[in-house]
Image (cartoon, coloured by chain):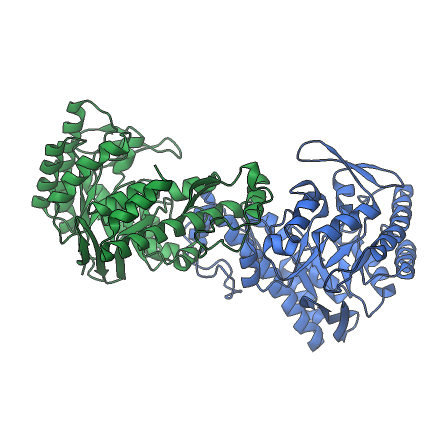
Chain colours: A blue, B green
Amino acid sequence: MFSFDVTATSGRARTGLITTPRGTITTPCFMPVGTRASVQTLTSRDLVDLQAEVILGNTYHLMLRPGADLIAEMGGLHRFMDWNGHVLTDSGGYQIFSLEPKVDDEGALFKSTYDGSKHKLTPESAVDVQTKLGSDIQMVLDVCPPLPSPDGVIVAAMQQTHRWAERARAAFLDRPERSDGMRAQFGIVQGGLDLDRRVESAEFLMAVGFEGYGIGGLSVGEKRTEMLPPLLATTDVLPVDQPRYLMGVGDPLSIVTGIANGVDMFDCVLPTRLARHGTVLTTAGRMNISNAQYANDPRPIDPGFPDSPIANWSRAYIRHLLQVKEPAAARMLTLHNIAFLFRLVDQARDAVAAGTIGDLVAEVGEHWS
Amino acid sequence: MFSFDVTATSGRARTGLITTPRGTITTPCFMPVGTRASVQTLTSRDLVDLQAEVILGNTYHLMLRPGADLIAEMGGLHRFMDWNGHVLTDSGGYQIFSLEPKVDDEGALFKSTYDGSKHKLTPESAVDVQTKLGSDIQMVLDVCPPLPSPDGVIVAAMQQTHRWAERARAAFLDRPERSDGMRAQFGIVQGGLDLDRRVESAEFLMAVGFEGYGIGGLSVGEKRTEMLPPLLATTDVLPVDQPRYLMGVGDPLSIVTGIANGVDMFDCVLPTRLARHGTVLTTAGRMNISNAQYANDPRPIDPGFPDSPIANWSRAYIRHLLQVKEPAAARMLTLHNIAFLFRLVDQARDAVAAGTIGDLVAEVGEHWS
């Protein structure tokens, strides 16, 4: 009920197709982040217009507001959002990185960012919450240390992630199948920047056995150049016939570099967060539409991307809306930035098939660092 | 190039059709307010989806941000917003009510709400600004006192409005026609709650001669029951073959009451402002979707309005988005509230044709006060 087929390869890069009872996901793909059951400023209708195939939901946020039981009572996250595409849910593991909870072997004890109340996430409860949400692809609870961290912290985090992965898999297999027969859970590779540990972590998780593999613990403070060797070490080991998901990475150059090195899936708050601050992803690089130089600029936001969903409005208009704090501006830029990354992965898919992914990486590198 | 045809009448009520080079406006109509060249939270594409025919723009705000010259340079307000429907612009007169500028016979001296800088609006400069904006229907600069006000204030405001109307009309006729031949300027009737003064004001403005007439100085502090007699006194005098626009009125009961008494056009920030605070206009009356009772309510926002543009989402989902401050919520409720008022004027139009507008007023009065 969950399958992945490689449709073309070029060096380490590949294109593929994930097939589920819900439909298909063409890879490589970028997943917009819908933290609180909404990709910020957008509705599910916008996601359909953007031709999104899969979005990400946040277990940590949804278990606190509105609560996993409420979402289950409302028919699951898809019905709650009126979204028929795929949903991948993270496990709350990233919050172990960003919110610094108390972690012991049992799980992680968080303080709610909403009301300060205490909540425990264990590998098992993360499965339960994601099962209640009804997501299509679940992620295991992992420990994601920031970089740089002392070696002992990196190793301990990896080992904890491994022990939790075994428990999460057992819990997952123990729960009843979803009514449509769908069952997909991804393990998460940790191990910091050390190549041997990355290999060790990937092999451990493969031995446990998942439908796909997240590559975690990267893009958490290290330089981009430092990210590539451990990424490569990981994709070289992971199964060719299963999807690989580079977690939390979404800048244009990292996306195409990741694709060139065998990654299939990406997610990041970057396009939505930048949009809210007036920063636009364009074919000519990063653009701050708030700058005074755009005040009377009649050109569309990105002349190099004439199919942008906001190509019918001028830079002058969009800048004006931002200046006077009209809420429509953030939505317009969110639509554009997501469409820009969708276009980028489309181009990468074509480039892999044509054997020109290296050229695309070079081209993107001219405008993005 | 601007014509108005009455298509049906029932008592004082009528339906009509405004025809311009840009297209048609079916009346009675409700005009959403796009203060800063955007109906808050929406884009022009949303307005097309809502089948809006005319929106309102604010001279005062647009002359300050981004400035009338900039909008003219960008091809006018329609092109700036990428909006092909009609735009009616107010004159800044309402700000004389709400911002208390220094008013003398020459004009009104405002302090900018953006940066405190001083700006003068005269009857002539209000025409110039609206001409630069390229609006389809201009309003004259008027003096709109709050209610209650001392009799002397009401009379002085009316007389100032009259003198300014003559100057505004002269200035308007003195400016070159728009390239499409379009020319429409509405006078504004003042006179407070006194019936004789309302008649005097209407007759004065009719003698000056305009393409249509605004009814101003109502819904500015008085009770609803106090509004009706001066409204009636005014519509009884105004020409039957020209449109009548009740300014700043947009609650459901006032709209249908206005229509029953011969009004053709309405505008109000009510549906957009309420939406941002989680208040929903429904067939069962006003609803605050933030209330805890809706937390797990799977029903659509208004079961009595199955064609609402947000009927596919549950009350529980919309409430959740509001609770966690997701910006999509305000847009969804704005779409609904505007669609609700559009539906209401559609129903009123049908009721006028069927001779049942009185029944509709009674029906709306059961849910709205």
Judge whether residue A362 can be spotted in this image: yes
What residue lies at 72% left-to-right and 32% top-to-bottom? A117
State which quarter of the image contains the C terminus of chain A: bottom right
Which residue is more in the foreground, A40 or A183? A183
Q: Is residue A173 above or below residue B256?
A: below
What residue lies at 34% left-to-right and 50% top-to-bottom? B344
Q: Quadrant of residue A32?
A: bottom right
Where residue A290 appears, x then y in whole percent? 50, 46
Where residue A23 appears, x then y in whole percent? 67, 68
What residue lies at 44% left-to-right and 59% top-to-bottom? A299
Q: Is residue B225 above or below residue A121?
A: above
Q: Quadrant of residue B53?
A: bottom left
State which quarter of the image contains the N terminus of chain A: bottom right
What residue lies at 60% left-to-right and 50% top-to-bottom? A38
Where residue A322 appears, x then y in whole percent? 47, 45
Judge whether residue B89 can be spotted in this image: no
Q: How many marks?
A: 0
Q: Quadrant of residue A3?
A: bottom right
Q: Is residue B249 left or right of residue A272?
A: left
Q: Is residue B35 left or right of residue B239?
A: right
